[in-house]
């Protein structure tokens, strides 16, 4: 099995090292990762700059640092690394959770989504740290992935669908199990902080302290906050089928035509 590994925290993150080491025990692994931290880049791609790559000089696993974002890493990796394609894309382990609507900002999730758009089975993996700069427990992520590898790869997911997995950042022995989840909600206090520079001009900086989260069972947020690994199936098809039907009903009941 050929496995392409990326992340959004950058090639120097210990999280991608932990993920690639698990992958290397399972198949032919190559790493293409951003040359610096690109967290919260979402599903961006680099259009107006050359995407250069340099060897990262890992001793045991072929690894490259890419002057780009995770989407670029997948595309460059498929062209320059796995010419014949690959069977699995892994993105992570992210140094922080990707839960609720934060998922839409995530470069980690976007890396997996890009793999899925290429028709490749793809999985994003993030560590659920909630205490500021707490220990990300990458070793917990690595061990959980090792122990659940067969189960994950046999899951009936079909690209462009893919998986986003959030693993609580706690000792492995404290993980209670896993839950299949849907996206929940988190709310932040002081989301965007206004400060002033020495010339009294305002500038803004995101902070992002979670003050409230939904505790609805079945959500990704609930699972991780309760010590379970959250496995969420996602799709890049954003069509809201519920609203689609309502719009059709609305148009027909009001005798409106889409041409008027
Ligand atoms: Mn990140």
Image: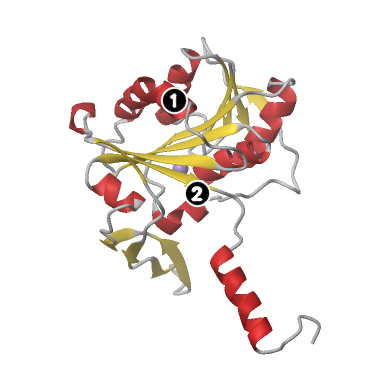
Q: Quadrant of the C terminus?
A: bottom right
Q: Is residue 202 above or below residue 19?
A: below
- Judging depth in this view, the residue of 79 and 236 nearest the camera is 236
Colouring scheme applied when the structure was drawn? secondary structure
Cα distance in 3D space between marks 2 and 1: 17 Å
Choose top left, top right, bottom left or bottom right for residue 114. top right
Residue drawn at point x = 48 percent, y = 74 percent:
201
Choose top left, top right, bottom left or bottom right for residue 152. top left
- Residue tagged by mark 1? 19
Q: Circle 1 — which element?
A: helix
Task: Report x, y in % for residue 160.
Answer: 62, 42
In the image: residue 91, left or right of residue 229? right
Task: Report x, y in % for residue 32.
Answer: 60, 28
Q: Is residue 172 above or below residue 235?
A: above
Q: Which mark is residue 106?
A: 2
Q: Is label 2 within 8 A of ligand 1 (CB to nearest ligand atom)?
A: yes
In the image: residue 2, left or right of residue 129? right
- Judging depth in this view, the residue of 7 and 186 nearest the camera is 186
In the image: residue 240, left or right of residue 259? left
Q: Circle 2 — which element?
A: loop
Residue lying farthest bottom?
Answer: 254
Tell me if I can see residue 132 in this picture. no
Task: Report x, y in % for residue 141.
Answer: 34, 29
Tell me if I can see residue 12 in this picture. yes
Which class describes the residues within 10 Å of circle 2: few (<14), some (14-19), or many (20+)?
Answer: many
Residue drawn at point x = 23 percent, y = 33 percent:
175
């Amino acid at each position: 099995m050929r496995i392409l590994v990326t992340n959004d925290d950058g090639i120097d993150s210990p999280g991608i090292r932990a993920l690639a080491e698990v992958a290397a025990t399972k198949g032919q692994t190559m790493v293409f990762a951003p040359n610096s931290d690109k967290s919260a880049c979402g599903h961006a791609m680099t259009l107006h700059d050359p995407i250069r790559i340099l060897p990262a000089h890992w001793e045991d696993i072929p690894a490259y640092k890419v002057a780009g974002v995770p989407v670029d890493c997948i595309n460059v990796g498929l062209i320059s690394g796995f010419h014949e394609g690959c069977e699995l894309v892994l993105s992570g382990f992210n140094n922080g959770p990707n839960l609720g609507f934060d998922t839409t900002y995530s470069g980690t999730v976007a890396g997996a989504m890009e793999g899925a758009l290429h028709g490749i089975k793809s999985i994003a993996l993030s560590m659920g740290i909630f205490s500021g700069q707490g220990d990300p427990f990458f070793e917990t992520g690595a061990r959980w992935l090792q122990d659940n590898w067969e189960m994950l790869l046999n899951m009936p997911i079909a690209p462009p669908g893919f998986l986003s997995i959030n693993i609580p950042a706690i000792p492995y022995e404290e993980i209670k199990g896993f839950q299949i989840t849907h996206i929940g909600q988190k709310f932040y206090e002081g989301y965007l902080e206004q400060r002033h520079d020495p010339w009294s001009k305002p500038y803004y900086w995101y902070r992002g302290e979670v003050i409230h989260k939904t505790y609805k069972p079945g959500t990704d947020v609930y699972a991780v906050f309760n010590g379970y690994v959250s496995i969420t199936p996602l799709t890049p098809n954003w069509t809201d089928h519920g609203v689609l039907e309502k719009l059709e009903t609305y148009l027909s009941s009001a005798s409106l035509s889409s041409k008027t």
